[in-house]
Amino acid sequence: MVHISTCPFPALVEISVSTIQRIFKQDRQGDATVDTMASVSKVAKTKGHKISPLLLEAFMDVKVSKDLLKSLADEKEKAAKLDRKLLSYKERKHKKEVAKVEKELQNNQLEENKKLKGRLHSQIIQSVFAIYFRILRREDDKVRMRLLPSVLKGVARFVHFIGVEYMDDLVKTLNGIVENEDCKPLEKLLCVRTVFAILSGDGSSLNIDPFKFYEHLFKVLHSLDGTENRALYIELFHCVQKGFIERRKLISADRAARCAKGLANLALRSATKEGVAVSLLLKAVFIAHPSLDRYLDAEFVSSTVAPGGDMGSASGPLWELHQLRKHHHPANRAIIDALLGNPKSLTGTFSKLLHCDPVEYLADASTDIFDA
């Protein structure tokens, strides 16, 4: 089946990849996934990694961690809920003794099962990252750039499973990718999100300076003209959530202000639904960084810009908020009004936006009612 995924006929490739995805989703033990990953690795090497990006995206359905450890425990819980029949005293006593012995055996079996699944889990992760690293380190830029988006999505998905000893090398590899002039905005954002994920997990103990990756994030943020597809917006939102909300205690006030100003500008440039989603994210950034409240203070704003000063600079007042307050779309106006101190604006029709996640809002087709 893996060999078919490398054929030149798109219909057959889709069928093959769909079957592989089904194997990953339905594999409760992990052994079928290990065998499939071994086949993928072998085929990828044989073909010089000239494989379909769809095959790499199928890795996103691989079950790891708690998913592999849960199935057996669920089965035992279901078995314990069988209807109990009326039994005599001796039968109940005997049943208790049998249940006690069975429980001990089950505990031993469960422990062995967890160890087996742990070994399978380790093999799966090793196979996944062996394929990813071989592609990332390829000298053939054409093959690498074609597969790069799929690889980076997977690295961002599984990065918290790899050992700390590999993270420093991975960060250097990702830095080399974002520094490449041919690297596209989506690929840069995937690299940035992966680094933020590393720094938020076990990699927080490493001596990694994220400054360069924040600068790349700002460059992408300021380069967007509002016509990009939603996949790029969603990846940008993930980066901001990882880099400025989850890591809020490590972010300076100036850096948070640069992010807020960039998002406010993007909200003005974006189409209706994307603009509302950006405003929601801007609101979340303000909540995560109380230091930004100074930009809502009229005295601070008036004292920040001297006569003849640059009102559009990153450190200047957020005049964009007042422009957004006059936005043509009522949902955008409501969010900014709430941000500027009028929470009652997010009531009635827009009450759903009060605790709405920007990514979920952008991905949810039902929220198109606000686009009218």
Image (spheres, grey):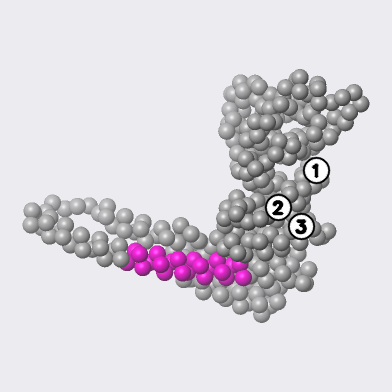
**323 shown above or below 159:** above
Residue type for callout 2: Asp
Asked if one can make out residue 26 in the rendered structure from this viewpoint, the answer is: yes
Q: Between residue 289 and residue 320, name the one nearer to us.
A: 289
Which comes before the other along the chain, label 2 or label 3? 3
Q: Report the magenta residues as a range.
A: 109-130
Q: Amino acid at mark 3?
A: Val
Residue that numbered label 2 is attached to: 209
**Helix or strand or loop: what does disc 1 sit on?**
helix
Task: State which tag comes first along the sequence, 3 or 1.
Answer: 3
Mark 3 vs mark 1, foreground winner is: 3
When the figure is inspected, residue 332 is found, relative to residue 199, above or below; the finding is above
Viewer-nearest residue: 154 or 329: 154
Pointer 3 residue: 178
Q: Position of residue 35 (x, y in %)?
A: 51, 74
Identified at 79% across, 28% down, the residue is 317
Q: Residue furthest right?
A: 308
Q: Image quarter for residue 285? A: top right
Q: Is residue 263 visible?
A: no
The structure residue drawn at horizontal position 66% and vertical position 80%, both measured from the top left corner, is: 46
Q: Is residue 164 magenta?
A: no
First reached walking from the N terminus: tag 2 or tag 1 = 2
Of residues 246 and 281, the one drawn nearer to the viewer in this rendering: 246
Q: Position of residue 330 (x, y in %)?
A: 70, 26
Q: Which mark is residue 222?
A: 1
Label 3 residue SS: helix
Magenta span dominant secondary structure:
helix
Query: Separation of disc 2 and disc 3 at Cα?
Result: 15 Å
Q: Quadrant of the N terminus?
A: bottom right
Q: Is residue 126 above or below residue 210?
A: below
| Circle nearer the viewer, 2 or 3 | 2
